[in-house]
Image: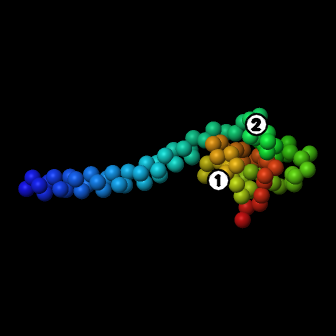
Amino acid sequence: MANQSRRKFMRNSVLGLAALPFGAGILSKTAFAQELPRLDPSSPTAQALNYVENASDASDHPAFEEGELCSNCMFFVEGTEGCQLFPENSVEPDGWCQSWIAQG
């Protein structure tokens, strides 16, 4: 009888350890996504792409066209207000950068 309990414990332990990376990956991605700090427009990365928090501030940029916003760019991640170009930050949905490309 002790061998059966031991086998059951070992089997459950192995299954639990095998599933751990999947659960940890899901939890860490969710937690990380919800805590993205807002991109600082004065940071070197933001300045390299001419990022502004208000798209109308880019009206004098040659690449800017009326209606282009971070929120309708293909790089925008709606759930976190993140941007694939600035993966460690969130961006202002009404912002703009010179890498703007229409969604879909």
Residue at screen point 83% across, 55% down? 67
Relative depth, front residue between 101 and 44: 44
**What residue would you read off at disc 1?**
78
Which element carries disc 1, helix, strand or loop? loop
CA gap, disc 1 to disc 2? Answer: 24 Å
Residue 69 place in picture, x, y as percent: 78, 52
Q: Is residue 16 left or right of residue 1?
A: right
Residue at screen point 76% across, 47% down? 94
Q: Which quadrant would the C terminus be assigned to in this image?
A: bottom right
* First of labels 1, 2 by sequence position: 2
Relative depth, front residue between 25 and 59: 25
Residue 66 place in picture, x, y as percent: 86, 54
**What residue would you read off at disc 2?**
44
Residue ranking furthest to the left: 1
Q: Is residue 37 left or right of residue 29?
A: right
Residue at screen point 35% across, 55% down? 18
Residue ranking furthest to the top: 42
Q: Residues within 10 Å of mark 2 (few under 14, many from 20)?
A: few
Judge whether residue 14 can be spotted in this image.
Answer: yes
Residue at screen point 52% across, 48% down? 29
Q: Is residue 48 left or right of residue 4?
A: right
The circle drawn on residue 61 is: none
Q: Which amino acid lies under the numbered mark 2 shown in the image of this protein?
A: Pro
How many circles with numbers are drawn on the protein? 2
